[in-house]
Image (cartoon, rainbow, N blue to C red):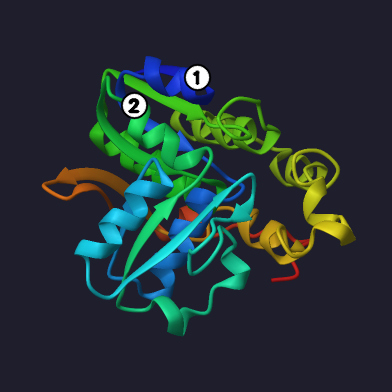
Amino acid sequence: MEINILHLIEGAKQARGLTVIIDVFRAFSLECYLYDMGVREIRPVGTVEEAFRLRNTLENSVLIGERGGKKCEGFDFGNSPSSIPAAAVAGKTVIHTTSAGTQGVVNARGASEIITGSLVNAKAVAAYLLRRNPETVSLVCMGNGGVRPAPEDELCAAYIQSLLEGRPLPDLQQQIAALQTQGGRHFFDPAMQEIFPEADFWLCTQYDRFPFVIRIEKDDMGWLAKKQHIEIPAENYSEVSCFTGSKA
């Protein structure tokens, strides 16, 4: 298996083979939590305009998304997993657009298959890749706005690669803790809590919480992000997988 780590929107355009679009803070962590809340389906789109058009054709749908971290005007919710009540989305179709994560999906045109990735389902992502055993894997770190590298996405890619190669990443928890003063420092800024609640940091760093992947498909309405459960041996989840500093 050839493993390539790529970066940002340009990396998504270069991706080949089975491609993992990674966005830890917060797009693809959020999508895992949304499925855990019981949403019917998630439809990622590239633009705000597409989101509004799609809502006009889909009954029982909810608009979720951000630009520059802020909730898009006219949307139901922003890109914050801690700010969305399960009762508001359960059984509904979520139309989702973000500055980085969903941009990776719509730009990975050379990929043979696309799944999304984040720390909260990294082990499931690795298990899926090992089961599929493609010749080429592209791990795309979407970064900030798809244009600037983000340490949390780089860490997630390194973790997935270590799982694929069968070697441990012994300092994973320490590296996650370091994100509090690196890629996640904005979650601890009192002036930014309305946009970046501290609780989002803890939710997005609970690594290996979910035993499923989100696979990207396409139908006559556009992109569709579908949950797919992955059978992982219980012993692989025997270690404490949630960052011990979590307040969630």
Which numbered marker is on residue 6?
1
Q: Is residue 78 visible?
A: yes
Which numbered marker is on residue 96?
none
Q: Is residue 231 visible?
A: no
Mark-to-mark CA distance, 2 and 1: 11 Å
In the image, 55 versus 127, the foreground residue is: 55
**Is residue 68 toward the left or the right of residue 245 in the image?**
left
The kind of residue on which mark 2 rests is Ala
**Is residue 9 toward the left or the right of residue 149 in the image?**
left
In the image, 164 versus 107, the foreground residue is: 107
Q: What residue lies at 66% left-to-right and 38% top-to-bottom?
A: 152
Secondary structure beneath dot 1 equals strand
Q: What residue lies at 33% left-to-right and 35% top-to-bottom?
A: 129
Secondary structure beneath dot 2 equals loop
The kind of residue on which mark 1 rests is Leu
x, y percentage for residue 97? Answer: 44, 49
Q: Is residue 57 above or below residue 108?
A: below
x, y percentage for residue 199? Answer: 71, 66
x, y percentage for residue 200? Answer: 67, 61
Q: What residue lies at 44% left-to-right and 81% top-to-bottom?
A: 88
Q: Quadrant of the C terminus?
A: bottom right
Query: Local crowd at mark 2 within 10 Å, few (<14), some, or many (≥20)?
Result: many
Q: Work out whether mark 2 precedes mark 1 in sequence or the reverse, and give the earlier one.
A: 1
Q: Is residue 108 above or below residue 16?
A: below
Query: Local crowd at mark 1 within 10 Å, few (<14), some, or many (≥20)?
Result: many
Q: State the residue position of label 2.
A: 108
**Is residue 35 toward the left or the right of residue 98 in the image?**
left
Q: What residue lies at 29% left-to-right and 62% top-to-bottom?
A: 55
How many numbered marks have been drawn onto this rendered protein structure?
2
x, y percentage for residue 29? Answer: 52, 54
